Amino acid sequence: MNYVALHRHAQVSLSRSAVAHNLEVIKDHAHAQQVMAVLKANAFSHGLPEMAMLSSQSGANRFGVAMLDEALTLRDLGYQQPIDVLGLTDPQFVRLAAQRDITLAFSSLATIQQAAKVLADTSLHLKVSLPVDTGLNRIGFKERDQLVLAIQEVVDSKQLEFQSLWTHFATADTPNETYVDFQISEWQRLTQNLPSQPKEQHFANTGIATWYADKVDTDIIRLGVGLFGIDSSEPTMPMPFELEPVLELTAEVIFSKPIKAGEAVGYGADYRVSRDGWLLTIPIGHSDGYPFNADGMRVLIADGQVGHIAGGVAMDQTMIFVDKPVNVGVQVTLIGKVGVQSVSLSDLAQYSDASIVALMNNFAPRLQRIIVP
Ligand SMILES: *Cc1c(COP(=O)(O)O)cnc(C)c1O
């Protein structure tokens, strides 16, 4: 069962101004007209309802998701903007998509024919997007004749509308410009002189919009990781602008006691306190998506002290060693800023030897989401 823990003091805060800033700088930099906020996987685990609201209020005029269920959730929340499902959907579900005006992607002639059959004898219309595989080799048409047949099938069907052609780049957040150029030439080879033109085309994810915007049409950008203020290239590419991290992770001290040098802390009793000090317990753990192997990591106490995780990260509780007493109720920042100090997701990824993208996608649904200015 899914639940949100409203009765404990641990939370994710999402910054409205950071979302607005990230969206604006990337949109400006790429000279984009439209921003499709890509909110797959519970908005990169930040929270779908919250990120849908913040991104649409900041000027995202449409959404992209990975699967139909995410698109339906957005419709249930009341959003009427265009929604693209960027993964593949089983054609047996196309009625649902057509009824809710959700654009689906198809990667083969056979599935387009199945979709047309499911919709035949209805008054429903389905918007169809055709991904073109220019080198990621995930989904999409990579043979020109197949693409032409697919387009003809869509155009000939009364129920299908040829909404878009698009592609996705494999090296957009890396210095591998050669492969970006290769994919662009593949696009040109596969899409020249098609029998019919779609209403729109889109190419750019965060990486293309940030580092290769001069190479492709960036009228519509599909903005994922950058919306959240995360540099997924780190540390291989210089950022042409500053992003602001959207998320902070905080908890309040629920228990506090003095501790003596030599005492053991946590499971296994392996960790020994090296000097007299204070031990704080916070109600957050690796079940919340904080990394399991972050023993010894730096955290920021609201009184200005820097504490360190002691005795490992347990499922729901974690202990922090500090030198000076801290009362119950004081806030501890695990990811975020306190005064001039900060702990970024990137710091935590490096410390725990995790990928930043894996970490940013790992925040548990049970964490309460709070929107801050
Ligand atoms: C995830 C995804 C995006 C967003 O990519 P980012 O690199 O996170 O900006 C865009 N397009 C497609 C097809 C995707 O799967």
Image: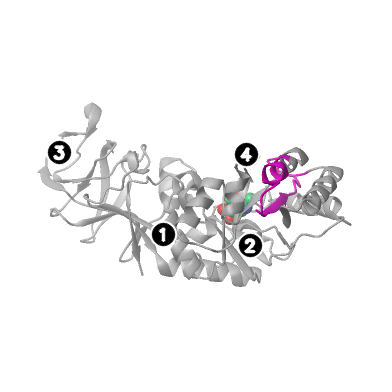
Q: Which residue is at a point 53% across and 55% down the rendered structure image? A: 225
**Residue visible at 44% across and 65% down in the picture:** 54
Looking at the image, is 254 positioned above or below residue 53? Answer: above
Labels 3 and 2 touching (C-beta < 8 A): no
Mark 3 or mark 2: whose residue is earlier in sequence: 2
**Amino acid of disc 1:** Glu
Q: Is residue 334 left or right of residue 84?
A: left
**Disc 1 packing (10 Å; few <14; some 14–19; many ≥20):** some
The structure residue drawn at horizontal position 83% and vertical position 43%, both measured from the top left corner, is 146
Q: Which residue is mark 1?
A: 50
Instruction: Give the residue at mark 3.
Output: 261
Q: CA distance from mark 3 to mark 1?
A: 44 Å
Q: Nearer the viewer, mark 3 or mark 1?
A: 1
Between 271 and 360, the residue placed more toward the observer is 360
Q: Which amino acid does the dot numbered 2 rest on?
A: Ile
* Foreground residue among 196 and 55: 196
Look at the image and tell me whether residue 167 can be seen: no
Instruction: Tell me the magenta residue range.
Output: 114-141
List x then y, in percent, for residue 184.
Answer: 78, 54
Instruction: Choose mark 3 or mark 2, whichever is in front.
Output: 2
Residue 340: which disc?
Answer: none
Instruction: Tell me if 150 is positioned left or right of 176 in this view.
Output: right
Q: Which residue is mark 2?
A: 221
Q: Which mark is residue 92?
A: 4
**How far is mark 2 from mark 1, CA to CA?**
21 Å
Left or right of 124 in this view: 302: left
Element type where label 3 sits in the image: loop
Q: Which residue type carries mark 3?
A: Ala
